[in-house]
């Protein structure tokens, strides 16, 4: 399932008869989640310290915008190895991950999650093989 809704902190804009946006109605993040379900669009990039060093070196800070599943029962945040590779994240270690199929040591990275309602957080993420059905 792919969430195609975008969220910029506002509900659908109000337009005049010429199609110009005249107002946007702010809505809270929890209301957005209630209406769209547990999938949200987030941007993942490097933590501030790494991003600052990349910028000082004249390099572009890579970022990836993806659809994320909010799982309140999860014990860690997971991304695919492909996302970690696209961002060139720095690995900080390994974590044992148990699934219904097996148990394996997966690489851990430190990343910055930017939510589209303005809040961001630096967190460890685990690169796991994730499947879509």
Image (tube, rainbow, N blue to C red):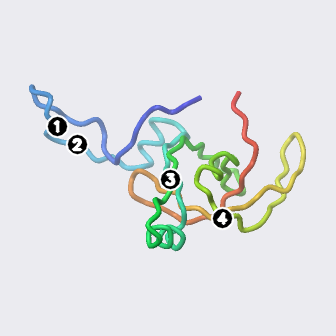
- Mark 1–mark 2 contact, CB under 8 Å? yes
Q: Assess whether mark 4 and mark 3 are in contact (beta carbons under 8 angstroms).
A: no
Could you tell which of marks 2 and 3 lies nearer the N-terminus?
A: 2
Q: Tell me the element at label 1.
A: strand
Residue, x 39% and y 42% (percent of image)? Answer: 7
What is the crowding at mark 3: few (fewer than 14 residues within 10 Å), some, or many (at least 20)?
some
**Which quadrant holds the N terminus?**
top right
Q: Mark 2 highlights which residue?
A: 24
Q: Are marks 3 and 1 in contact (CB under 8 Å)?
A: no
Point out the tag, 3 or 4, that comes first from the N-terminus: 3
Question: Which numbered disc, 4 or 2, marks the residue that appears first in the sequence?
Answer: 2
- Structural crowding at the residue carrying mark 2, measured as other residues with C-alpha within 10 Å and reported as few (<14), some (14–19) or many (≥20): few
| Label 4 close to label 2 by CB (< 8 Å) | no
Residue drawn at the location 70% of the way across and 52% of the way down: 74
> Which callout, 2 or 3, points to the residue nearer the camera?
3
Disc 1/disc 2 C-alpha distance (Å): 8 Å
Q: Going from the N terminus, do you reach mark 3 or mark 1 first?
A: 1
x then y, percent, for residue 110: 63, 65
Q: Residue at x 25, y 43 (%)?
A: 25
């Amino acid at each position: 399932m792919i969430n195609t809704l975008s969220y910029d902190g506002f509900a659908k804009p109000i337009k005049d008869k010429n199609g110009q946006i005249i107002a946007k109605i702010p809505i809270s993040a929890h209301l957005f989640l209630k209406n769209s379900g547990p999938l949200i669009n987030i941007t993942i990039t490097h933590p501030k310290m790494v991003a600052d060093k990349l910028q000082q070196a004249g390099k572009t800070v890579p970022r990836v915008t993806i659809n994320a599943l909010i799982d309140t029962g999860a014990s860690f945040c997971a991304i695919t190895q492909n996302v970690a590779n696209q961002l060139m994240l720095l690995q900080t270690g390994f974590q044992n991950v148990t699934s219904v199929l097996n148990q394996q040591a997966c690489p851990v990275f430190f990343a910055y999650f930017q939510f589209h309602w303005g809040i961001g957080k630096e967190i460890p993420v685990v690169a796991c093989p994730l499947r879509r059905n």
